[in-house]
Image (cartoon, grey):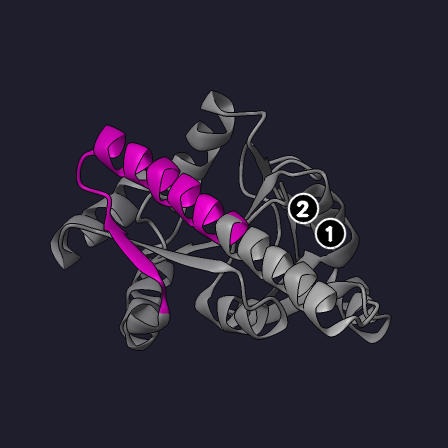
Amino acid sequence: MRGLLIVVSGFSGVGKGTLTKELLKRYPEEYALSVSVTSRKPRVGEENGREYFFKTREEFEKMIENGELVEYACYNGNYYGTPAAYVQKQLENGKNVILEIEVQGGMQIKKLFPETMLLYIMPPSAKVLAERLMGRGTETAEEIHGRLSRAIDESAYVTSYDTTLVNDDFEVCLNAMHKVTLDRQKEMDARRSFAEELKNELVKITGQEE
């Protein structure tokens, strides 16, 4: 069974990263995380190759020139992108590959890979979102304001996503992420099987070779 490509997006501070990490922890045989490349500096506790591959702006732009990314976007003055080779390898191995990326990148991925499932994580309210951002203690008041302003722009893309989940209760949201992924994978596998069977029958009827 071929893996499913899953784009997970959401407002900054909504908890999408925590949800994704827990999903990978509980179901390591079913999921793989595509580690993104970014030109932003590491936050406290982040390691190169784990949370992100950290590159300089010049190095990132070189990767764009060389066609090493399936998508990229500029967010808050920093580049974020998805390396192509890793994604293809994991999908071929049957893993569901999670791309935790911004909406711009999500739209690019959907065009390149139409079978991609776009999943958007929502906060229960704007007030809760602001409280979560402030509670992280990793950003200045100005940076938090910028992220909330960005959330206003991102709101326009939410209806373009296949599924939206509200991260109010962590366990409920996590279980819903896993279920919707399995349901979508089964659906796509059934479509492929039916299309293959139909093609084989048509070949027999017409006498044509593939």
Residue at 47% in and 63% down: 102
Task: Report how many numbered discs are placed on residues in the image.
Answer: 2
Q: Quadrant of the C terminus?
A: bottom right
Q: Quadrant of the N terminus?
A: top right
Residue 77 seen from this side:
no
Q: Element at badge 1?
A: helix
The disc at residue 88 is: 1
Quickly name the residue at label 2.
Answer: 91
Where residue 64 appears, as percent x and y from the top left, is: 77, 71
Amino acid at dot 1? Gln
Q: State the residue in front, 128 or 202.
A: 202
The disc at residue 172 is: none
Q: Element at badge 2?
A: helix
58 magenta-colored: no
Residue at 46% in and 22% down: 26
The magenta segment is: 161-189
